[in-house]
């Protein structure tokens, strides 16, 4: 939910909430076992997967 008082110019730069889906599903999966202390940025999810050798959907 975006407050009505938020300027349109700023609100239009926000990422859609759906972008969090793939990283959350990964973190809840057995494939994420043992991964701790990582910063996973949803907008860079594909790059993170490539660097860490993780198959992503």
Image (cartoon, grey):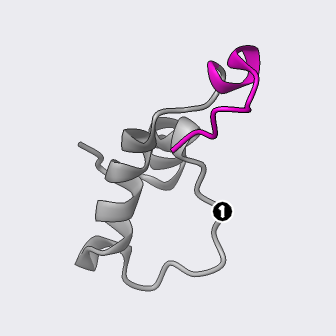
Task: Name the residue at 42% across, 52% down.
Answer: 53
Residue occupying the far top of the picture: 9
Q: Is residue 11 magenta?
A: yes
Q: Position of residue 24 (x, y in %)?
A: 37, 62
Identify the image quadrant of residue 40. bottom right
Q: Is residue 27 magenta?
A: no
Between residue 7 and residue 18, name the one nearer to us: 7
Identify the image quadrant of residue 13. top right
Which region shows up in magenta? Answer: 1-12
Is residue 54 visible to the viewer in this orientation of the structure? no
Task: Tell whether 46 sits left or right of 47.
Answer: left
Task: Tell whether 51 sits left or right of 37.
Answer: left
Task: Tell whether 4 sits left or right of 22.
Answer: right
Specify the quadrant that holds the C terminus: top left
Task: Name the residue at 36% across, 41% down.
Answer: 18
Q: Which residue is mark 1?
A: 39
Q: Secondary structure at mark 1?
A: loop
Q: Please, is residue 40 above or below residue 18 in the view?
A: below
Q: Position of residue 19 (x, y in %)?
A: 42, 40
């Amino acid at each position: 939910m975006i407050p009505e008082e938020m300027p349109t110019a700023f609100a239009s730069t926000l990422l859609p909430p759906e972008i969090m889906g793939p990283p959350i599903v990964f973190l809840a999966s057995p494939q994420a076992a043992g991964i701790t202390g990582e910063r996973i940025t949803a907008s860079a999810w594909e790059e993170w997967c490539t660097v860490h050798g993780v198959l992503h959907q």
